[in-house]
Image: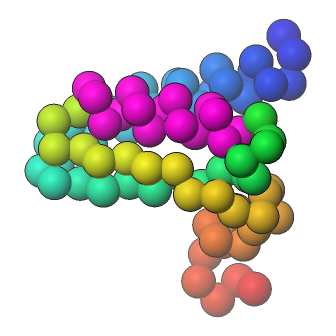
Amino acid sequence: MSGLTRRAALAAAATALAAPHLARAQGTQLAIATGTTGGVYYPLGGGMANLLSRNIPGMSATVEVTGGSVAIASCSAPAGSG
């Protein structure tokens, strides 16, 4: 399994696990951080946002362009860790 395919499968699995919890929320907004618009993760994030928005009532998911994996890692670091 290639790296991109494995990552796509992991992202899909994470989305499937989170979906039941998200389904209970009303008027929930979700921003999916990706890399640049020319990178491979922007279309993947867009597809995930589209699926979530269409299939979960009250969910509004969007894609946010970031500086890539380093920027995303710094956004998701626990408070006080860096």
| Residue 75 to residue 5: above or below | below
Residue range in magenta is 41-55
| On-image quarter of the C terminus | bottom right
- Quarter-of-image position of residue 66: bottom right
Q: Residue at x 41, y 32 (%)?
A: 50
Report the number of discs: 0
Residue 63 visible in the displayed image? yes
Question: What is the chief secondary structure element of the magenta stretch?
Answer: helix
Q: Residue at x 66, y 50 (%)?
A: 34
Which percent across, then down, holds residue 69? 79, 56
The answer to if 52 sits in the magenta stretch is yes
Name the foreground residue: 39 vs 31.
39
**Seen in the image, is 31 located left or right of residue 72?**
left
Q: Residue furthest front?
A: 38
The answer to if 6 sits in the magenta stretch is no
Q: Residue at x 80, y 25 (%)?
A: 4
Q: Residue at x 23, y 54 (%)?
A: 28
Residue 17 visible in the displayed image? no
**Seen in the image, is 2 located left or right of residue 40?**
right
- Quarter-of-image position of residue 1: top right
Q: Residue furthest top?
A: 1
Name the foreground residue: 82 vs 62.
62
Which percent across, then down, holds residue 54? 28, 28
